[in-house]
């Protein structure tokens, strides 16, 4: 009790509370801007803590780290662009709700779930610190592999009625994550001689292209985010909050998932987010289907990702093993302030530990209340014309992607991934499954190889491994059985010809990946890519056979897919309107990328935003320069003052 009172007194000092507030607002800004992420924000703030005491320093750092997963739902719900990888699952139902005119409800549910999840995580941290060390030490490498494999089994749920597509998309995502220098053998894999690819495909660029650009194309053709003219109201926000309270068992279960898995080193926020989403999807309950605007699809991941912060701090404090990437940066702050993780954090520095619990809990309360106050004005953005919104969002996506490596290849990769995401959306291949495979791939490969090195194939017989792999297999079998029943009852699925083209191309790609990995990669670097490519080839071949059979039956019966086949059996890839939207977004990205390289990101922002809005003709001639000026100031504040990093010299300045 004395320790708790000491921590309360220390945290009640005005300067420390001010630092907590500053961290919260910095975290809200960082989370709301796609392409930055909490990892960057944490690294940015650590130098500012050098002259602070430990209480103020950790109030600032944990204030920021605790809430960036609260505000990252703003672009996820409004634009379908995850503010960070932790909001990717929220996109599926949150953005669908916004398109139905339920943005305020989605925000209300999201922020209230984040608040409960964050406080829950802090309480778990407080209760678990004395006992967590033996539990985490009990887990071995094979157990970590089984946890990641269990997370990957969620793809069967993410694929809805077509689990083969989900598994194939996940395998493709895993192949993509293997690009770069191998961590085990040091071999380069599919880098094509480009130094840019040595570190692999940047996850920020991949997620912005995969989710952001396809949704912007749809938004441009739709005219606005919201499909109706309903004015966002406080009643919608209250409804979302009541949804969260009504689903309190789901909130607590997903908060527990976030806290417990957050405490396991190597299980990142993107993994536990999808596991929580998959848990909710197993019991869909009333309302729309998951992926079509089910509020439970917002509540589940938001509860989990905010509870994660308290969980990931547990192994960090207990014995200096970071539970997440941001916690590894926080360990640097421990060193700076003379704190040693382990018994001392529960002994002479126990008051600092308790103050961390208070910081996480207070930060989540302040962050959620701040976002709830802003819910109605944020929801009004859903009614703004797409011809104004699209140029603004593209600016943050393109510049956010460019600041990853400051290379022109950032633009190339963004548009290639964006084109792939558009194709997947048009052909109904689950992008979320690709994203999950991309995130889980490195962990699966690392744990697989280490487990194999330590005990050969005997690790497959360990009890926890058997339980988790059994649950994963049972979930996928169950989903496949339901798919077979639905297929038998509904007949052939639409779009057989585009599916055949895509799956055939994927088969060729998988075989090529398998052959190159077998011939050119060392065994350590090639074994897991070969397994992945082999599975992808089998899945793609199965889809090809399946769709070829459907296509033949359709032609024999004289039926064609209304949406995607012309009378002569030729494929009309997508509606002309959708194709126009996709090409328009790619074109706008190309223009902005060229401007950034030529004249710099700030001048390019002003010229692009003003020119695009004028070209669309959606505002008076006075409005575009004003909107462009405000956007440029925001860009300067975020990417120059807050980020404070050197930008490459524009090409025109190099010439003159």
Image: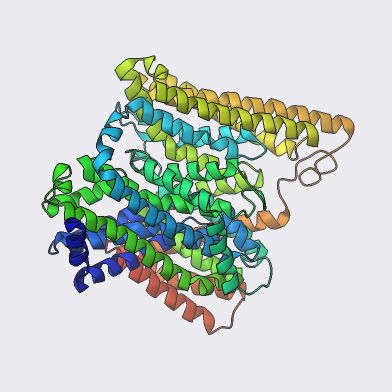
Residue 232, above or below 532: below
Q: Pick the quarter of the image with the C terminus.
A: bottom left
Residue under the image location 73 percent in, 52 percent down: 575
Residue 446, above or below 278: above
638 relative to 432 in the view: left or right: left
| Residue 363 on image: x %, y % | 33, 63
Q: Which sits in the foreground, 62 or 379? A: 62
Q: Which sits in the foreground, 15 or 393? A: 15
| Residue 284 on image: x %, y % | 62, 46
626 relative to 560 in the view: left or right: left
Q: Is residue 511 visible?
A: no
| Residue 645 on image: x %, y % | 27, 61
Residue under the image location 49 percent in, 34 percent down: 152
Residue under the image location 38 percent in, 42 percent down: 260
337 relative to 264 in the view: left or right: left
Q: Is residue 240 visible?
A: yes
Question: Residue most toward the front?
Answer: 1
Residue 549, above or below 568: above
- The image quarter containing residue 178 is top left
């Amino acid at each position: 009790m004395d320790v708790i009172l000491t921590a309360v007194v220390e945290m009640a000092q005005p300067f420390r509370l001010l630092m907590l507030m500053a961290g919260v607002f910095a975290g809200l800004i960082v989370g709301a801007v796609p392409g930055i992420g909490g990892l960057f924000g944490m690294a940015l703030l650590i130098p500012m803590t050098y002259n602070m005491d430990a209480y103020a320093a950790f109030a600032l750092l944990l204030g920021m780290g605790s809430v960036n997963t609260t505000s990252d739902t703003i672009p996820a719900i409004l634009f379908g662009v995850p503010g960070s990888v932790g909001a990717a699952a929220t996109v599926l139902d949150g953005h669908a709700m916004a398109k139905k005119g339920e943005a305020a409800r989605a925000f209300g549910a999201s922020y209230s779930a984040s608040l409960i999840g964050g406080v829950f995580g802090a309480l778990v941290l407080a209760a678990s610190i004395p006992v967590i060390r033996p539990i985490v030490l009990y887990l071995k490498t094979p157990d970590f592999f089984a946890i990641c494999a269990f997370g990957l089994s969620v793809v069967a749920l993410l694929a809805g009625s077509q689990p083969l597509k989900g598994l194939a998309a996940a395998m493709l995502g895993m192949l993509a994550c293997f690009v770069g220098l191998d961590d085990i053998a040091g071999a380069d894999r599919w880098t094509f001689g480009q130094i840019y690819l040595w570190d692999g495909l940047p996850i920020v660029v991949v997620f912005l292209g995969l989710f952001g650009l396809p949704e912007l194309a749809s938004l441009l053709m739709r005219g606005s985010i919201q499909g109706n003219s309903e004015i966002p109201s406080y009643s919608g926000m209250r409804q979302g909050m009541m949804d969260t309270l009504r689903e309190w068992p789901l909130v607590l279960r997903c908060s527990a998932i976030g806290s417990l898995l957050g405490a396991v080193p190597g299980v990142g926020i993107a993994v536990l987010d999808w596991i929580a989403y998959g848990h909710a999807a197993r019991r869909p309950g009333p309302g729309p289907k998951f992926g079509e605007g089910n509020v439970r699809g917002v509540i589940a991941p938001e509860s989990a990702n905010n509870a994660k912060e308290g969980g990931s701090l547990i192994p960090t404090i207990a014995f200096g093993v970071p539970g997440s990437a941001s916690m590894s940066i926080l360990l640097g702050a421990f060193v700076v302030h003379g704190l040693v993780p382990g018994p001392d954090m529960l002994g002479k520095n126990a008051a600092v530990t308790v103050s961390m619990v208070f910081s996480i809990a207070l930060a989540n309360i302040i962050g959620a209340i701040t976002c709830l106050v802003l819910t109605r004005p944020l929801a009004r953005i859903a009614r703004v014309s797409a011809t104004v919104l699209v140029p603004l969002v593209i600016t943050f996506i393109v510049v956010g992607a460019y600041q990853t490596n400051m290379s022109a290849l950032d633009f190339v990769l963004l548009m290639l991934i964006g084109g792939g995401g558009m194709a997947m959306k048009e052909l109904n291949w689950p992008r979320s499954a690709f994203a999950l495979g991309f995130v889980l791939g490195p962990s699966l490969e690392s744990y697989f190889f280490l487990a194999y090195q330590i005990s050969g194939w005997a690790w497959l017989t360990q009890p926890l491994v058997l339980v988790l792999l059994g649950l994963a297999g049972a979930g996928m079998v169950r989903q496949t059985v339901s798919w077979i029943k639905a297929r038998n009852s509904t007949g052939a699925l639409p779009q057989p010809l585009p599916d055949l083209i895509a799956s055939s191309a994927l088969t060729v790609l998988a075989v090529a990946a398998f052959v190159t990995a077998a011939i050119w990669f060392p065994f350590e670097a090639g074994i897991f890519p070969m397994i992945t490519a082999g599975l992808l080839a089998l899945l793609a071949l199965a889809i090809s056979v399946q769709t070829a059979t459907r296509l033949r039956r359709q032609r024999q019966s004289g039926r064609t897919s209304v949406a995607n086949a012309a009378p002569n059996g030729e494929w009309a890839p997508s509606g002309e309107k959708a194709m126009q939207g996709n090409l328009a977004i790619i074109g706008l990205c190309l223009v902005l990328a060229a401007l950034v390289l030529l004249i710099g990101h700030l001048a390019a922002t002003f010229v692009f935003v003003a020119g695009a809005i004028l070209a669309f003709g959606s505002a008076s001639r006075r409005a575009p320069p004003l909107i462009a000026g405000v956007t440029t100031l925001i860009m300067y504040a975020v990417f120059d003052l807050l980020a404070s990093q050197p930008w490459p010299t524009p090409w025109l300045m190099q010439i003159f």
